[in-house]
Each structure stands twice: as structure tokens, then as C-alpha cells.
Image: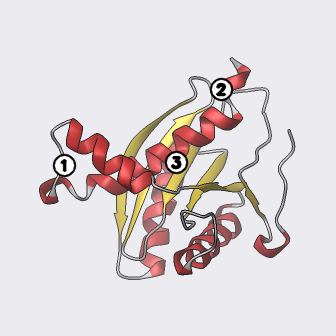
């Protein structure tokens, strides 16, 4: 399968990927104005794991933290959750997530895919609550868990059939 480029996203593809012959590492981001959850996964096992939370007051500081993650994990692909309405339409945060995806593509020269993230935060909160880590005390875990859910769905859709 070949990546499909969206004309409005120059360098960012949406929910498609290239199936490499070798396993690859993927970092995924659950974008938010204040917090960005990060997850890591790979195509060898088609599994995703929550990684960390990026918090910064400026875009430059956020990108510095993400730069450190990219250097550490050396991903071959990035995935950014695209927040859509329940009906699948765009919303104000969709525009910001797309801009963030374009920034990542330009900065790291790594393919970036957009993946539907509808209800990922709700599912993350429920999963954490069921594991005894819900509520305000663990609210920062939600973002990384949401990124994990987005990445796991992406891996299931694009790479699980390889095994």
C-alpha cells in the first residue's frame, strides 16, 4: 500500500502507510493545546505502549522535547491523532493537529500520517479507571494512553495483516 498525500497537508498523509519489508518504530502523538501524549510502537509486534507527556508553554519548547524523543527512539514514521467530531467533521483542534503534523514532517523529514482519534481520550480514561489509575490524581496519564490507543488502532489497521 502506498501513502496517499493530502494536498492541503503538504508532506502529511492521512491514515495510510507504506508497508516496509523490515519492522519499523513509530511514535504517535495525541495533540492538545497544553499537553501532547506520546506513545511508541513497532510493526514487528504490532503493539503500542504509552510513553510520556510533553508539556511546554511554547511551541519551540514542545518541539525540543519531541526532538529528544525522536533522537532516542529513532522512528521511521510518525502518527498524529486527528481530532474529529463524532460525525467525522473538522473542528478547531483539527486545524492545529494538522499544523503540528506538518511541523513534525518538516522538522524531522520523517513520514507523518494522520489517524482518526475520535473517542481515544474517553477510552483512555476508562482504561485507566479500570486499572485503578483514574481520576484527577492520574489525569496526566490520559494523554499518553490516548496516543497509545491511536497508535494501536493505526497498527491494527495498517500492519497487523502482515503477521
Residue corresponding to mark 3: 150
CA gap between label 3 and label 1 equals 19 Å
Tell me the residue at 61%/42% (across/down): 154
The image's mark for residue 134 is 1
Query: In screen coordinates, is 123 left or right of 93?
Result: left
**Residue farthest toward the left in the current orientation of the protein:** 137
Indicate the secondary structure of the residue bearing disc 2.
Answer: helix
Count residues near mark 2 (Cα–Cα under 10 Å), then give few for <14, some for 14-19, many for 20+: some
Indicate the secondary structure of the residue bearing disc 3.
Answer: helix
Which of 93/18 is in front?
Answer: 93
The image's mark for residue 72 is none
CA gap between label 3 and label 2 equals 14 Å
CA gap between label 1 and label 2 equals 29 Å
Rendered location of residue 16, percent (x, y): 76, 48
- Give the mark, 3 or 1, whose residue is nearer the N terminus: 1
Residue 19 lies, with reference to residue 139, above or below; the image says above
Residue corresponding to mark 2: 160
Q: How is the image coloured?
A: secondary structure
Residue 103 lies, with reference to residue 70, above or below; the image says below
- Give the mark, 1 or 2, whose residue is nearer the N terminus: 1
Tell me the residue at 59%/72% (across/down): 100
Rendered location of residue 130, percent (x, y): 22, 37
Amino acid at each position: 500500500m502506498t501513502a496517499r498525500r493530502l494536498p492541503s497537508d503538504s508532506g502529511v498523509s492521512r491514515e495510510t502507510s507504506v508497508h516496509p519489508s523490515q519492522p519499523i518504530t513509530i511514535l504517535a502523538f495525541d495533540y492538545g493545546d497544553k499537553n501532547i501524549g506520546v506513545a511508541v510502537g513497532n510493526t514487528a509486534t504490532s503493539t503500542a505502549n504509552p510513553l510520556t507527556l510533553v508539556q511546554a508553554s511554547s511551541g519551540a519548547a514542545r518541539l525540543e522535547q519531541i526532538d529528544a524523543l525522536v533522537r532516542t527512539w529513532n522512528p521511521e514514521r510518525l502518527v498524529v491523532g486527528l481530532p474529529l467530531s463524532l460525525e467525522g467533521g473538522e473542528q478547531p483542534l483539527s486545524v492545529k493537529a494538522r499544523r503540528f503534523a506538518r511541523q513534525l514532517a518538516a522538522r524531522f523529514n520523517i513520514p507523518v500520517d494522520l489517524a482518526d482519534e475520535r473517542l481515544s481520550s474517553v477510552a483512555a480514561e476508562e482504561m485507566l479507571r479500570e486499572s485503578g489509575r483514574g481520576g484527577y490524581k492520574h489525569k496526566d496519564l490520559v494523554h499518553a494512553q490516548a496516543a497509545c490507543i491511536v497508535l494501536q488502532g493505526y497498527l491494527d489497521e495498517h500492519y497487523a495483516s502482515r503477521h
